[in-house]
Image (cartoon, rainbow, N blue to C red):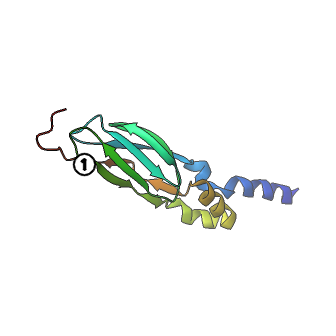
Amino acid sequence: MRFSALIVLSIFVAGCATIVKGTTQVVAIDTPGAPGAACELSSPGIGSRSVVTPATIELDKSQHNVAVTCRKPCFQDAVAMIPSYTEGMAAGNVIAGGVIGLGVDAATGAMNKYADRTSVTMIPVQGCRA
């Protein structure tokens, strides 16, 4: 009976960040001075997603940074990066959940976190009238 209880407990603890932090995150994207820009976000972790600024978008967490490319008439195309960081909880998971817990969190992306807000600076094209 104790062995069964131990197995059940280890399954619940196995993916600590997966349970506590989740596998998705809402990220805000803005283009100050150029609202309405069409931005494409891409990475191996999220694939390709599109938004119009200002925007918030829910992304699947992963270890990969997210490339952002924004376009708007009369502005130069602009690029930025949404960095992916390792959650501090990952270290605690090694102690509490062991290798299995770390593996679960790594596989689900839960041990990663994106920057909450990204501003993409767009430069106006001189003399352009849209």
| Viewer-side residue, 128 vs 7 | 128
Q: Is residue 96 above or below residue 61?
A: below
Q: Look at 65% across and 62% down and name the residue there.
A: 103
Q: Is residue 93 left or right of residue 68?
A: right
Tag 1 secondary structure: loop
Is 11 above or below relative to 28?
below
Amino acid carrying mark 1 in the image: Thr
Left or right, 112 with respect to 71, comes to right
Among the 4 quarters of the image, the one containing residue 3: bottom right
Q: Where's residue 125, x and y in %?
A: 16, 44
Is 60 located above or below residue 38 in the figure? Answer: below
Work out whether residue 18 or residue 45 is closer to the camera in this orientation and state it.
45
The residue identified by callout 1 is: 121
- Residue pushed farthest left? 127
Q: Residue at left 79%, top 58%?
A: 7
Dot 1: few (<14), some (14–19), or many (≥20) neighbours within 10 Å? some
How many labels, in total?
Answer: 1
Q: Is residue 98 left or right of residue 23?
A: right
Q: Residue at x 20, y 39 (%)?
A: 74
Q: Residue furthest right?
A: 1
Q: Position of residue 51 (x, y in %)?
A: 40, 38
Quarter of the image for the N terminus: give it.
Answer: bottom right
What residue occupies the far top of the structure in this picture? 130
Q: Position of residue 79 (x, y in %)?
A: 32, 52
Pick the quarter of the image with the C terminus: top left
For the residue pair 95 and 29, the one nearer the viewer reads as 29
Q: Which residue occupies the foreground of this view, 26 or 64?
A: 64
The answer to which quarter of the image holds residue 70 is top left
Report x, y in % for residue 89. Answer: 53, 60
